[in-house]
Amino acid sequence: MKKLFIFVVFASFLISCSSTNPLIKDSKDVLPKEVVEMGLYFGMRESDFLDNFKYEDKSTSFGFRNIYTLKTKHPDIELISLYFDTDDNSPLYEMIILYPDEEKARQAGIAVLGQPNLNGTEWMFKRNNSHDIKAWNYQNKLIVTALIPNTEWYEEMYGTK
């Protein structure tokens, strides 16, 4: 009986440690592993971010979004800027990942997203069970956005909230 109890407790622990948030799993598919390993994911609420991360800088000058800057310990990623919407639970909808140079940013995008599939320079992924993703490189940055309703890029892509 004692062995059965230990097994049940251990199995419950393993199940509780697995991700129940589908956004976390989906973010793994579209973000560099170094970013995922930090615990960042699209749809993360701003309050959860503030409870679990120490940021370098915050900008609220746009009104419709809050921007936080994180330093990383990874040698190829200098900074990550995180864009949180200010409405609807303040979800994380955009990450700008700063690399030392353009080539590293380009290679990081290809490594996680494959060859660009939109205009030869951008990525666009329609997904049934999660938010669509749009990404591109700009200079030494990889910019990845989740098209979450009521956020900046959703409105830009689909013209509606």
Image: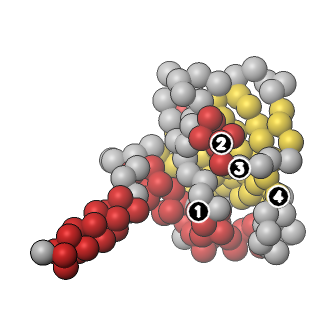
Question: Whole-Å distance between the Cαs marked 4 and 2?
Answer: 17 Å
- Residue 26, image x, y percentages: 44, 56
Residue at label 2?
A: 51
Name the residue rendered at 84%, 63% in the picture.
Answer: 78
Name the residue rendered at 70%, 22% in the picture.
Answer: 64
Which amino acid type is shown beneath numbered disc 2? Asp
Residue furthest to the left in view is 1
Which amino acid type is shown beneath numbered disc 1? Val
Residue furthest to the bottom in view is 3
Q: Is residue 158 visible?
A: no
Among numbered discs 1 and 2, the one appearing first in the sequence: 1
Question: Whole-Å distance between the Cαs marked 1 and 2?
Answer: 17 Å
Residue 53, disc: 3
Question: Whole-Å distance between the Cαs marked 3 and 1?
Answer: 14 Å
Label 3 crowd (10 A; few <14 / some 14-19 / many >=20): few
Residue at label 1?
A: 36
Q: Residue 37 falls in which quadrant of the image?
A: bottom right
Which amino acid type is shown beneath numbered disc 4? Lys
Question: Whole-Å distance between the Cαs marked 1 and 4?
Answer: 14 Å
Among numbered discs 3 and 1, the one appearing first in the sequence: 1
**In this orientation, which residue lies closer to the viewer: 14 or 91?**
14
**In this orientation, which residue lies closer to the viewer: 121 or 133?**
133
Residue at label 4?
A: 71
- Residue 34, image x, y percentages: 65, 69
